[in-house]
Structure formats: structure tokens, C-alpha cells
Amino acid sequence: MKEFLLHYHYWVVVFLMMTGLYAVVASGNLLKKVVGLNVFQASVFMLYISLGVVDGGAVPILRPEVTVYSNPLPHVLILTAIVVGVATTSLALALVVRIKEAYGTVEEDDIHRRDEAE
Amino acid sequence: MMLDNLAVAQVVAPLAAAPACLLPWRRVAWLLATTCSGFSFACALVLLGAALDGGVVVSEIGGWPAPFGIEYRIDLANALVLTIVSGISTIVLVTAFASLDGEIEPGRQPLFYSVWLLCLSGLLGMAATADAFNFFVFLEISSLSSYALIAMGRDRRALTAAFQYLVMGTIGATFILIAVAFLYLSTGTLNMADMAERLPSVSGSRTVASAFAFLTVGIGLKMAMFPLHQWLPNAYAFAPGAVSAFLAATATKVAVYGLVRFVFSVFGVDYSFGSMPLPLVLAALAAAAVLVASTVAIYQENLKRMLAYSSVAQIGYMLLGISLASPAGVAAAMAHVFNHALIKGALFLSLGCLAWRYRSSVGAELAGAGRAMPFTCGAFVVGALSLVGVPLTAGFASKWLLLSAAFQAGWWPLAVVVVIGSLLAAIYMWRALEVLYRRPASPAPVREAPLVLLVPTWVLALANVYFGFATEYSVGVAEAAAAWLFVATP
Amino acid sequence: MTDLVLAALFVMMIMTALAAIRLTDLFAVVIMFSIYSLLAASMFVVMDAVDVALTEAAVDAGIATILMLATLVLTDRWERPSARLRMVPLAVVCLTGAVLLYGTLDMPIFGDASSPANTHLATYYLTESPGEVGLPNVVTSVLASYRAYDTLGEVAVIFTAGVGVLALLGAARSGRGGAAPMRDNPVPRVIAKIMIPLIILFALYVQLHGDFGPGGGFQAGVIFAAAIILYAIVFGVDAAAQVIPPAGLKVMMTGGVLLFAGTGFVTMALGGAFLDYDVLVRDPLAGQHLGIVLVELGIGITVAAVVISVFLAFAGRRRAR
């Protein structure tokens, strides 16, 4: 059981990344694209954090009785990446709202059609 | 001692001035933005001077030595990029004083200047840094601010263009994040120089190869490398005029620099061009970019869109230079980074002048502008000549360099591609000029553009001619930068 | 035991992710995303990344979900269903996945303490930071001191998003915001009145306790914003705009960034490098502590102001007919 996880947890994370990426490129609905983007990014974060796990290590908050800690650097990087992700999401959603007001729809095909008609 | 502070100050000043721009008076916001941009330009010139003297300016931010802290390293390659970015920003900001009034309501203009400064800070930070993750953070600063700037265009298609750019750009940035993760995993560090030291011992690893692939694709999305360029035509066409001029001249170039930096200073020449199929892939995609994008440009009615496709082709030239994997090829690429900024800057600014009077960038609606606005169209003509590569212009200098590098390396097909590309450029530029000059003038007589728009346009147009003569400043610096990159590569 | 928990989390995450992309009811999709984020946060806890878990829960399961729901209200609830699987995107995605998996083949085993990633820099931070920075929470030491410049960049990103959303959607307009359907319902009103002060108190705790436990400016800013958002949801956007006027929010956004960057300028003026806290006070460790407190405060103020502004901008928008 442990061996399976030790080797194949990367596969699960990659599968989750690809699920998110598929939603982004294949979906015609703008809101779903944004959700897919977030799923994709959250999975990348999990990949990073799993790199820093140390067997038998503790949370990287220094305490006198602990000797082995997990790696704090991926945590720092991912904290930054999470914030960047939500910043992108808010901007994307603001664009979706404005697009709905300008075009009356948030389906990509309809938007193309309305632009061609001009 | 002062120099390393300047290296940081030029990036942090726009970043700190951006919140200060949120004032209710748009003229004050404009003044703050332009002054700050000018300050960064002055810093960049000083750093360029220091780099030309052969030194590398190293700045340890936070006082922590690399690799434990973040470090800035300014050598010739990025000093050149820093100068272009801050220089173009300052020149275009001067024109924004007038051009914005026709495109953005007065109440929103301070927000515009604030986001502009953030974009400037992001681009400068990308160029100056020697830390892989810091590169990602400032890439995101410049990207997010670009999406916001583009979305402020008047046409509703600016919104969809910004959204498409956002989606593609975020995927690209996430790919770069993945690449940095793989690199960190293999080397245990984030500092570029440290990575370069540690990579050779793990260079056979599949993780490193995967990192290389993700990095190239991620940066490729940002630089509009064919076939990942689909966001660019609409983004440049529908953004406000000043934004098109600024981004066309700088944003993709910084991405090209990013690729050069990672290829040479992190992965190393031997790995990138030896173990990885980079030369072949780059050359093929670059040639496709030149031929396909130039051809599509011929059929565009909207002149801004035509110039946007032209930019995709010009990026192709830069990538062709890099794919030659020789100092001469990289020098050609770096020279074109500089020269293209001047060319596209001048062209987009003259279109901005035309849009100021005609309220449009569509060719048919600009008929006869050549007679009504002779100075503006004169600048456009100069830019067009430079783009095609007529001798004694800046464009000719970099094309000549590229051709001679291609001959030196024995890659005849690439030289043919360059020549065909120039012919295609001549065709689409001729179409534009023909509309501007030949067709009968529209009924209402139109005055010339205001000086605050015209003067910066002509500054850039004349710069094209100046650097066509005094090539030691553009080409000379580029050659020195390329030589340095090859020497300092791991 | 940990492995069972991990396995269960993985399975649930796969289920929610697949549901999120296959469902056409966008409301269900957003809720699935929220659950997915919570599961990811739990995953982070299991992997010893407690600061990250706190941030992920607050940001993705909290703020991102609220903004998506707000967008949903302003656009359409249902997606146009397309039954068939799109081939070209599928091919691109499979290719990307294949390259990713190829890259993982040479990766060290999960949990390896001697991998390059877990030595070198990591070992340095764990062993040297008590002497150089003096905080128990190593993540805070790295985030706010060693790599403080990245964090300044991060604050700039969130500020950019705030200004960008304001430029696109405008500040909250009162008038539309008068609607407060829950104001007359006693249950949400009473509970909100009890919860809001507790949430604000918790936010202050997280802000100040980040040196010793999980926490810091980002999490605190988001939690504080959540309190105000709760107030706005129950009592109306107008009432919230009275508590914290949009002009005040702009000042807070600006102030936070300037506090952070200003600390750096002060250190430069005092002769050190940018953001070199050692020079702030005579004793370097005290200087580090002071610098980190100031910087985290700047972060918290900016994040809170941006998140509240963004929410009010969405909430104040009239739905397009």
C-alpha cells in the first residue's frame, strides 16, 4: 500500500492537473474555463508540496523536541503562487462579467458568432 | 556600492509609485508615471554604462547572499533589455497625455497609469533578476497588468482579447512554474547561477529534460512563438493605442530575453543545443512564424492587426538567430530585440496619431491620411522602411547581421526565409502606404496630430535612422552581449 | 494511517475534479471546486504544509468561491452542454500529461530526506534561521526575510488585481446595493452579529501570531476581508460601504504597499541593501523581527483592502438583462 502511494502519487497529481487543463482548453463556457484554470493550478501546488515532504518530518515550526522537519521552501513558493492564482482569477472573473454585459453571453461560440456578424 | 542599489531601485520605484498614482487628478498621475518611468530609464542607462565597462552588477536583496536570498545580476544582455523597456515606456507615456483622452474616461485614467507602472516594474524585474522563482513572480506582475491594460480598450473585443490572453498566459506561467519545480527538485536551489553549477551533474535526468520542455513552451506562449501566438493579434489590435505601442515593443522581447537567459546561463549551451533538439525545433517554428504570419498580415484590413501579425514574424527572426547557436546568431537576435522595439514603437505610435484624428485603425477609413497628416505618415513611412530592412535603417542592421550569421553557420534555407520574409513585409507595408497616400482624400480636411503625440513618434522614427548609421551602439552592444553569454555559459 | 488518509483524499479529489468539469450546472461546478480546494487544503495539512493549508482554505475555498458565485449571479447558471469529447484539446492535454509523467520518472521517492530539494537551501534555512532571523516559524522567516522580495512582488500582484478589477468593474455603486434580502431574517442576522467580531479577532490573531505558528499577513488579510464580506452579504453592500468606504479602501491598498516598499527604502537609506532588516535597529535579530512585523502588516492591510474592494465591485454590479 505504501509502496503504491510512494510511486504513484505523482500520477494522481498529474491526472488532476490534466483534468483542469482539459476543462480550460475544451470548455466553451468562460466561467468553466476559469474553474478549470484553478483546478489546474491547485494541482500544481500539490505537486510542489509533495516534493518537500520528508518521511518522519514535522511541520517546519521549530520546536526543541523535534529534530527532523519537512522542507519549508516549497511552502513559501506555493504561498506566493496561491495568491498569484487568486489575483488572476479575480481579474478573469471581472472580464467574464464585462463580457456578459457587452455580448449578452459567456459561451465562446456565441461570442465568435456575434463578432463575425459585425 | 551605489550601482547595486540602482539595480533594485529601477524596479521598485515604479512598483512603489503605482499605488501613489491612485489620485483623483489624472494629469498628476500622468506626471508621476512619466517621471518614474524616466527615473528607471536613467538607472538603466547607468547600468548599461557599467556593464559596457565589463562589470556585472550584483545586488543581494535583503542583504542575504545568494542562493539563500534573491539576487539581481545585471550584465550586458539584460542591461540592453532594461534600457529598451524603460526607454520605450517613457517615450510612449509622453504620448499618453493626449492619446488616452480619446479612449479612456478621465475617472479611470489614474488607474490606467497605476497599472502601467506595475507592468513596467514587472518587465524590468523579469529582466534584472537572477532567481528563477523571482522571474516567475515578476512575469505574473507584468502579465496581470497587461491583461488589465488591454481590457481597457474601447472596443468590446478588447475584453475577449484580454480574456484569451489571460487564459493562454496563465497556462504559460503555470508551465514555467512546473519547470521551476522540476529544476528545484533536481538541483535544490532557485538561484540561476547556482542551478547552472549543479545541473551538469544531473543533466541526463528526465526531470531536467521535462523542465526544459515546459520552460520553452511556457516562455513560448509569452513571446507569441508560432503556433502559440493566437492571443497576440487581437490583444494588440484592440488595446488602447499607448498600450499596443508599449507592449508590442517590449513585452514579447523580455520573454525572448528570458529564453536566452535560461538557455545560456542556466541550462548551458552544450545541453540546450547539444542534448536537446532546440536548434531544429526553434528554426522550424521560427521559419513558420516568419512565412505564415507575414502572409496573414497581407490580408488584414485593420492596420493594428497587420502590425501585430508582423510582430509575430519579427519574433520569428529573433528565434532564428537564437537557433543558429552561434555568437553571431545570438548577436543578431539581441540586436533585433533592440531594433524591433524602435520599429514597432514608431509604427504603433504613428497609428496612434492617426487614430487620434480618424478614430479608427482600419485601412479603408484612413484613406488619404498621407496628404492630411504628412508628418504622421512620414514617421510611418520611416518605420515601414526600417521594418522591411532598407539599408541605412535599424531594421537593415539586424537583418544583415542575421543573414551573415546564417551564411556563417551554413544554414542557407534560413537566409532564404529571411529574404522572403522581407519581401512579404514589403508587400503588406506597401498595401498600407498605398491606402494612406494614393486613394482620394476623404471629404473632411483633417489637421495634423498634436505635438505631444507627434514629437515622441518622430523621436522613435529618427532613432531608427540613427541606429541604422551608428550601429556600434545597437549592434556593437548586442555583439558584446552575445559574446559574454557564450563565455559565461556553464 | 496517514497513507489511508492520503488515499481517501486522493480519491475524493479525483471525484470532485471530474465532477467539476463534467457538470453543466455551474453552481454545482463552483461548489465542487470549493470542495476540491478544501480537500487540497487537507492534503497540505497531511503533508506538513500548515501555512499553505491555511492560505489555500481561506483563498481558494473562500474568496475564489465567493467571487465565482458572484460572477454566476451576474451571468448564466447553466452551461451549454456539449456531449462529445473534443479531440484536439484532449490530444494536447494527453501530450502535456505524458511529458509531465516522463519528468516524474527520475524524481526522488516521496518523502526522501536526502533529495537535492530537501537538502542545500532547506537545511540552511532550518539550521541557520534561529541565529539570523530568530523566529520559530521557518516559513515566515523565509517568506518575510530571506525571500521578502518575492513577497513584495506577490503584494504587487494582488494590488494589480485590485486596481484591475476596479478599472473593469468600477467601485461599488450604492443604489443597487440597497438590497439585503437576509437583513430581515433573524437567523443570519444574529449569527452574523456573533461571528463577525470573532472572525475579526481571529484575523488579528493570525496576523500577529504568524511568527510562532501558521499565519501571517496573507491569511489574516483574507480572514479580515471575510468578516466584512459576511457583513455585506447579510446587511447589504450599502451598509458595508458605510463601515469601510471605497475611498478608505483605496487608501488602505496604497498604504499597505507603501508600508512594505517603504520599509525597504528605509533600510536602503540606513545604508543597507533593500529590505535588509539588520540595519533597522542596533541588534540585528530585533531588527529582523521589526522588519518582519512591519512587512506582514503591510501585506495584511493591502490584502484585506483588495479582497473587500473586489467583492464590493462585483456585488455592486447590476445584472445585465
Image: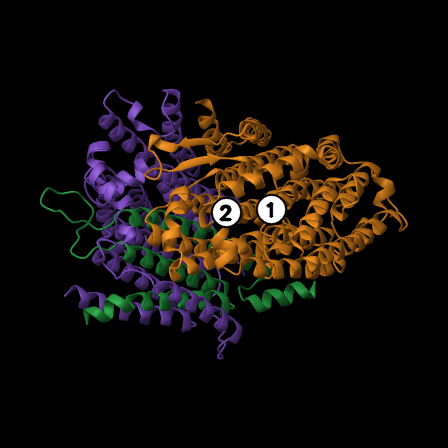
Amino acid bearing label 1: Val
- Which chain is represented by purple in the image? C
Which of the two residues, B477 or B69, is positioned nearer the viewer here?
B477
Q: Residue furthest bottom?
A: C84
Marks 1/2 same chain: yes
Q: Residue at x 33, y 61 (%)?
A: C34
Residue that appears at 78% across and 39% down: B392
Q: Secondary structure at mark 2?
A: helix
In depth, the one of A110 and B259 nearer the eye is B259
Q: Colour of chain A?
A: green
* Residue C134 appears left or right of B214: left
Q: Amino acid at mark 2?
A: Phe
Task: Give me the residue at 36% from left, 24% from top.
Answer: C272
Residue drawn at point x = 81 percent, y = 39 percent: B378
Give the label on residue B264, or none.
2
Q: Is B165 left or right of C270, judged from the image as shown?
A: right
Name the foreground residue: B378 vs B47. Answer: B47
Q: Residues within 10 Å of mark 1 (few under 14, many from 20)?
A: many
Of all chains, the one bearing label 2 is B
Residue B313 in the image, given as x and y percentages of width and height? 67, 54
**Position of A44 compared to B216: left or right?**
left
Quarter of the rendering containing residue C250: top left
Q: Is residue C94 visible?
A: yes
Chain letter matching colour orange = B
Question: Please, which chain is the residue tagged with disc 1 on?
Answer: B
Q: Are marks 1 and 2 in contact (CB under 8 Å)?
A: yes
